[in-house]
Amino acid sequence: MKKIYFSLIALSLSFAALAQCTPDPTVTKPGISPAKLPDGIVGEAYSQVVTLIVPLDSTILYQGTPYNVRIDSATVVSIGDLPTGFGYEANKASRTWNGGEKGCARLFGNPIASSVGFYEVSVKVRTFFKIVGLPNQLDQLDSSKIDFRVVMGNSMNELNHAQRLISYPNPVKEELNIEMPQYTQSAQFSIYNMMGQNMEITPSFSSLTGEIKFNTSILPSGMYLVYGKNNGKNYQVRFIKD
C-alpha cells in the first residue's frame, strides 16, 4: 500500500457507508486504518469500516519538487478495480474532505465465487493545496492501490478441490443427469449458485442408469455448481442453466 495521504483520502471517501460509522478513536496519525482490508468470503455479506485522518500540513512532491503545503481539501475522483458485487458511497455527499478532518468509511458487498482472487483497488483523488509562503491555490491528481482479496469459505474450498463428475445436458433446461460411480444410500448432493447459496433442490438416484438427477426447471438462467459427498469422497460438477 502506497502511503500517499491523497489516495487515503480518496479511499475513505469512496468507501464510506450508507449507514453511519464511527472513526477509530485510537488512530491518531494521518492516513487510513487498517492498512490491509480483511478478506471477503464468498457467500457472506462484507462490511468493513475504514478510519481516515486527512493532514492539514504536509510535504508533497509537486512536479518533481518537494514542498511544504497547507491542505485545503481533497475530492475523490474515482475508485476502481473492485470485485463484482461490491460498492461504495461517501458519507459526505460532496465527496470532499477538508484538511485536518477525521472520518470513516465502509466498503460493502456480497462476494461471489466468480470474483475469487486478489485485487488492487485503484484510488484516485484530486487534492487542493497551497505551498507555504505562496498565495495561489494548486491542485494535483494522485493515485494509490490497496490490496484486497476475495476467498472461498471453508465449505466452498472443499467444493473447489473436489473430484469432478460428468453431467449432461450442459447447458440444461429441465433435468440434469450426473454420472455417479459407486453410489451409496448415504450420498448427499446439492446445487449451489455462484454466490455459494444452496438452491435447496433434492436429487433422485436412478439405479438403472447409475445417475443422479436434478429437476433444474425452477432455476434462473446462470452458472451453478453441484457439490456432493459419497463413499468418503467429495465430488463437484459445474453446469449452465439455459
Image (tube, rainbow, N blue to C red):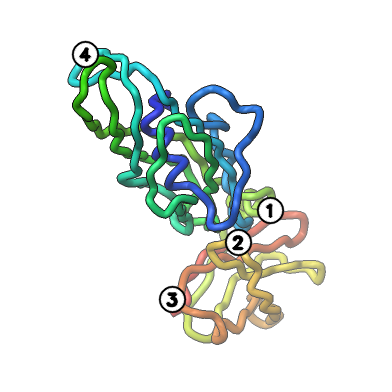
Q: Which residue is mark 3?
A: 171
Whether residues under marks 2 and 3 lie with C-beta atoms below 8 angstroms apart, the answer is no
Q: CA distance from mark 2 to mark 3?
A: 20 Å
Q: Earlier in the sequence, mark 3 or mark 1?
A: 1
Q: Earlier in the sequence, mark 1 or mark 2?
A: 1
Q: Which residue is mark 4?
A: 65
Task: Please name the amino acid that badge 4 sits on.
Answer: Thr
Please give the name of the residue rendered at 28% of the width and 33% of the height, measured from the top-left corner.
128
Front one among 208 and 18: 18
**Could you say which quadrant of the image residue 119 lies in?**
top left
Q: Which residue is mark 1?
A: 155
Q: CA distance from mark 4 to mark 1?
A: 53 Å
Q: Nearer the viewer, mark 3 or mark 4?
A: 4
Helix, strand or loop at label 4? It is strand
Task: Please name the amino acid that badge 3 sits on.
Answer: Pro
Whether residues under marks 1 and 2 lie with C-beta atoms below 8 angstroms apart, the answer is yes
Q: CA distance from mark 3 to mark 1?
A: 25 Å
- Disc 2 packing (10 Å; few <14; some 14–19; many ≥20): many
Helix, strand or loop at label 1? It is helix
Q: Nearer the viewer, mark 3 or mark 1?
A: 1
Q: Quadrant of the C terminus?
A: bottom left
Q: Which residue is mark 2?
A: 196
Helix, strand or loop at label 2? It is loop
Task: Please name the amino acid that badge 1 sits on.
Answer: Ser
